[in-house]
Amino acid sequence: MEILEVKGLTKEFGGIKAVKDVNLSVRKDSITGIIGPNGAGKTTFFNLLTGIYIPSSGEIVYHLKDTVAGKSIQPQKMPSHGIARTFQNIRLFKEMTVLENVLLGNHPNLKYSVFSALFRLTPFFTGEEKAVGEAMALLKIFNLADKCDEKAKNLPYGDQRRLEIARAMASKPSLLLLDEPAAGMNPQETKELTQLIKWVKETFQLSVILIEHDMSLVMNLCDDLFVFDYGNLIAQGTPAEIQVHPEVIKAYLGGENIA
Ligand SMILES: Nc1ncnc2c1ncn2[C@@H]1O[C@H](COP(=O)(O)OP(=O)(O)OP(=O)(O)O)[C@@H](O)[C@H]1O
């Protein structure tokens, strides 16, 4: 079953076609990788998927608890559709604590009304307590619980990356979009992150789409890969198929095998 279908998707910036007539579908419960050289259109594609950019033409359709398409695809609505994302450049609330960052990620699920919050009524406190409990449970999973009171800006880089994923998970998504989750991580951190994403996906029964340059992560983690080059989708298949795909080797790897 498909969780996402993309049909004839194109995005132009002035004269530049950053994404050109892309057609693809993503399987539910899979980990799907989007790869390609710098400037291939990967981030533009993610920004289209999350409503940050409006397509020049084409269509994006999500099959989640509801069908989501067209004008429903807006950045601020994505968490309530069950879609969460992280960014290539980490976007944490740097002056807030680790716990507060995760609590903010859970915002769409808080059930108390503004009235209860203003007047500090029981639903507000029970809602808050539950949210803090859930946020701490997530921080434990992401090995950040002992840093819950630290300001986000004081965390080492690898921890900030994991905190961003924890915050995305706080909205209880069924589809998680990760933009270069291993960027700036060392090989050991990347290995641990690979295991963590696999575990989170299995445990929370998610679908994951990720953009990544780190081939060890992509090859070890992804079920399906899509390869972009100059805005075109040039290949798709399993990691094993992509590693020996002639178009990919030519366009993406300058003639070298990516294995
Ligand atoms: N807002 C924008 N305005 C104009 N051109 C843009 C804009 N965003 C992206 N582009 C152009 O679109 C093309 C694709 O860029 P994009 O950032 O999507 O590539 P990418 O595959 O994510 O690259 P990288 O791996 O380096 O992050 C590039 O030529 C880029 O300069």
Image: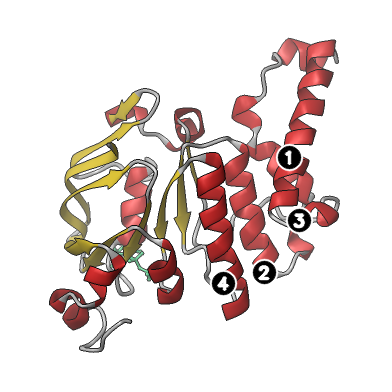
Location of the C terminus by quadrant is bottom left
Between disc 4 and disc 3, whose residue precedes? 3
Between disc 1 and disc 4, whose residue precedes? 1
**Of the pair 48 and 138, the residue shown nearer to us:** 138
Residue identified by numbered label 4: 191
Instruction: Give the CA distance from mark 2 to mark 3.
Output: 13 Å
Between disc 3 and disc 1, whose residue precedes? 1
Question: Which class describes the residues within 10 Å of circle 2: few (<14), some (14-19), or many (20+)?
Answer: some
Q: How is the image coloured?
A: secondary structure
Q: Point out the frontmost of discs 2 and 4.
A: 4
Label 4 within 8 A of ligand 1 by Cβ: no
Residue identified by numbered label 3: 144
For image coordinates 33% across by 56% down, the residue present is 44
Between disc 2 and disc 3, whose residue precedes? 3
Residue identified by numbered label 2: 157
Between disc 2 and disc 4, whose residue precedes? 2
Q: Amino acid at mark 4?
A: Lys
Location of the N terminus by quadrant is top left
Residue 128: x percent and y percent? 79, 26
Task: Report helix, strand or loop for mark 4.
Answer: helix
For residue 89, above or below residue 242: above
Q: Is residue 232 left or right of residue 175?
A: left
- The answer to whether the residues at label 4 and label 3 have Cβ atoms under 8 Å apart is no
Question: Which class describes the residues within 10 Å of circle 3: few (<14), some (14-19), or many (20+)?
Answer: many
Task: Report helix, strand or loop for mark 2.
Answer: helix
Q: Amino acid at mark 3?
A: Leu
Residue identified by numbered label 1: 135
Label 2 within 8 A of ligand 1 by Cβ: no
